[in-house]
Every structure is written in structure tokens, then in C-alpha cells.
Amino acid sequence: MQPKEFLKEHIAKTALLTDDEFDYFFSFFKHLSYKKGQSIIAEGDKVEHEFFVLGGCLKTFYINDDLKMFILQFAMPTWWASDYNALYSGAKATVNVDCITDAEVLCLSNADREKMCNNIHRIEHFFRWRTNKGYVASQKRLLSLMNNDAKHRYEELLEQYPALYNIVPKTLIAAYLGVSRETLSRLYHS
Amino acid sequence: MQPKEFLKEHIAKTALLTDDEFDYFFSFFKHLSYKKGQSIIAEGDKVEHEFFVLGGCLKTFYINDDLKMFILQFAMPTWWASDYNALYSGAKATVNVDCITDAEVLCLSNADREKMCNNIHRIEHFFRWRTNKGYVASQKRLLSLMNNDAKHRYEELLEQYPALYNIVPKTLIAAYLGVSRETLSRLYHS
DNA sequence: AGACTTTTGTGATGTATATCACATTTCAGG
DNA sequence: CCTGAAATGTGATATACATCACAAAAGTCT
């Protein structure tokens, strides 16, 4: 499917835009391709864009002082990714975004999003609901992290994203679950 | 300060409404008072409202199968609370909201919020930014939970809400941090 | 295919935190 | 002010998980 159609279908689930409105909306996106392993946002960067995933898989992650990695999100097609704290506040990135596989994305600047939200009410409606859903998902994950052990969280993750199992190394899955790769390995080999 | 002024100042930080618009906005809120210990939303309820805290302190929490409590949020004045998953999706509540102290709130229905968002663009703008901020805060807490030990999280919490120390029992603070009350007690007595 | 890198498995050991049990203190209501 | 309930402190023990170390297996590139 063409990027434009792909985005259109995604938006249509939350907001009804006329064809003209959607054309206007789409005109602000830049189509970009990345290779596996490439960095899209690195710690310390000024963050001015967010990314809608067309194909491939990104990871959003934080590296602590001991160089340990924590994954906030695996971004698959139709997901959005950025360092939203930095993007919204103007602060430097503390969170990185990388390509786990070759990836195709649509890139949108913060300024353009705000301009569109301001000009077209239904576009603001779309973005409100996108964040509403993200907020609810984030609360759910918080609860799961407090309530469930690593094995339970692992099964939850695979149920939600079966595709991940084949695409991403177990080290990364461990970094998402918040356990060591050794523990994750032992979870399903004993 | 009057509830109306209090809400007006809160909104003004994100959206510029005319006086007429704000009067319209305010007209949808119901002013309610609760006693310490009262339940506002209980597991299994149909959730149709969200609550803006004027005074006092609420807790939003989940009880697991072993009757263990996990606190998602302490809601202080100017904070909003509800079971947003249930409120947005129409599902039954899985999360509870209770009063830790006597509390005054403004109550807004989901239907009225959506009506207002639809009628007045700037109101939708306000709600988009409210959730944007909540989303970013939630991601930060997720990272902290994965990255930092209980002591670190405890200090972080007290730094952010010094008031909590005197208002809420340590058991509840432990339930927010995701540790047992015994462990929390030992953190600052040894 | 061969060489090198990345990923994964697994034992041994250490550590933060949970759980259980009970004592002590603090608080709220009659 | 007294009394029972709620909140807190603290020892003993259990457990999930981390860390370190090294080996095996699987990918990747020229």
C-alpha cells in the first residue's frame, strides 16, 4: 500500500477528514528510509520531529549511567515514535530512537503538527485521541510491571506482538520487560 | 479561591478561552464533596465521569488477585483522576478511585467533555495537552520503575510531592513505589 | 566457505526485596 | 481520657532476579 493510503486508513479510525483536509495533512509529512541499526534520535539531540512507522520496527530506549538499556517501546507499522518529553518541552533528548530492522517512516515536525492542529479542528481531535490511547497503554504497562513477574510480562508481550518474537533479539525483549537477558533465557528453558 | 476561578487558572495555562467560552465550559462541571475514605469509582462500576481535584487528595489504585494494592496516582489539587481506560472505552472499571482525605472535586462526564471538545476547538486543545503531559509523566515513571531501586524512587516521590509525606500513610506510599511497606520502612530506618 | 561478530544458554554466586510473625506506636471516636 | 483499630518497626527466612564468567550457536560480511 502507498504511504498516503496507509496513513489515511490510520487516521480514519479516529477522525473523519475530507479528502482536501487529508491532502493538506499529508503534505507536511516527509517520507524517509533508514537502514537497520541507524539512529533516528540520539541522546542530547534537539528533537523536532515525530515519526509514523510505515514499515519495519523501531525501538525507543533509554541508556542509564551503567550503560544498561531500557526499552520504552517497540514501534511497528502504524505506531508513532519520538522522545515526546523532549519534543513537547524543547529539552534535549534523553531517549533514543533506533531502527531494529530496515524501516520506512513518515516524519512530521512539532511545529507543523501544532500548526495543523490549530488550523483544522479534526486534526487536533485525532492527536488528542492518539495520546489518550498511548496514556492508557502506558498506565497498563506500569501496572503490569508492578504486579506481574517477568514470565507473566513476557507472555503478555508475545501475545500482544507475536511478530516481535522472530524480529528482535531476546536481549532487546529483556530490556523491554525490565529483566536481564539471562533471566529471560531461563524463563523459557527450564 | 472559588472553584470557578481555580479551574479557570488551571485551564489558562494551556488554552486561552474567552469568558463566555469558559462559562460554557464550567457549566458542565458538578461540584461534589467527599469524606475521607469514601469511594468515588469502584472496580466493576460503569465509569462515566472524570474528576478535577479542588482540595484534598485522592488515590487511583488497582487491587490484584492476592488483594495487594498498587497505586497509579495520588491526585492532589489541579490533578484529574478517573479510570481512563474504562472512561474512554466503555469497559467496566478495573481501577478504583478513593479519598485519602476529605476532598472537593469538580465532576465532568465523558459525554459532556466530548460535546465541548467538538463545539469549541480550544477546549479540545486543552484536553490534548492535558493528556500529552500525563503521557510523558507516565513514561518517566515507567523508566524510573525499571531503572531505579526503591530508595531512589522514594526520594524522587518526596521531592516531587513533599506534601504527601505528612498526608498519606507509608503503606500507601509503598503501594505507589511498588515495594512492600516493610521494605519502605527499612529504607529510612537503617 | 571461512572468519568474525552477535546472540543465546547455563552454572555459580550475590543482592534487593518479599513474606511472615509479632511488638510497638499512633490515631480516631465515643 | 480511654479503647480498639490502624499504622509502623523489626527480626528471621524465602525468593526472584542480577551479575559474572564462559561456552555454544547462529547470523553476517567479504
Image (spheres, coloured by chain):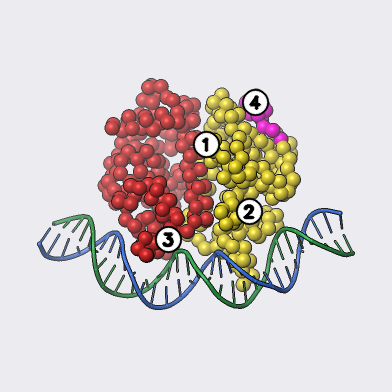
Chain colours: A red, B yellow, C blue, D green
**C6 relative to B3, above or below:** below
Q: On screen, B77 above or below D22?
A: above
Looking at the rendered image, the disc whose residue lies closer to the viewer, 2 or 1, is 1
Under mark 4, the amino acid is: Tyr
Please give the name of the residue rendered at 44% of the width and 49% of the height, measured from the top-left corner.
A92
The residue that disc 4 covers is B24
Taking the magenta stretch, the answer to whether it contains residue A136 is no
First reached walking from the N terminus: tag 2 or tag 4: 4
Q: CA distance from mark 3 to mark 1?
A: 31 Å
Query: Which numbered tag is attached to residue B89?
Result: 1
Judge whether residue B68 can be spotted in this image: yes
Asked which secondary structure carries label 2, the reply is: loop
**Alpha-carbon span between mark 3 and mark 2:** 29 Å
Q: Which residue is mark 3?
A: A179
- Residue drawn at (54%, 44%) of the image: B134
Q: CA distance from mark 2 to mark 1?
A: 31 Å
* Region in magenta: B19-31
Task: Please give the name of the residue rendered at 35% of the width and 47% of the height, measured from the top-left corner.
Answer: A162
Direction from residue A108 to residue A132 in the image, left or right: right
- Residue type, label 1: Ser
Q: Which residue is mark 2?
A: B161
Task: Name the front one of labels 3 and 1.
Answer: 1
Q: Nearer the viewer, mark 3 or mark 2?
A: 3
Q: Is label 4 or label 1 in front? A: 1
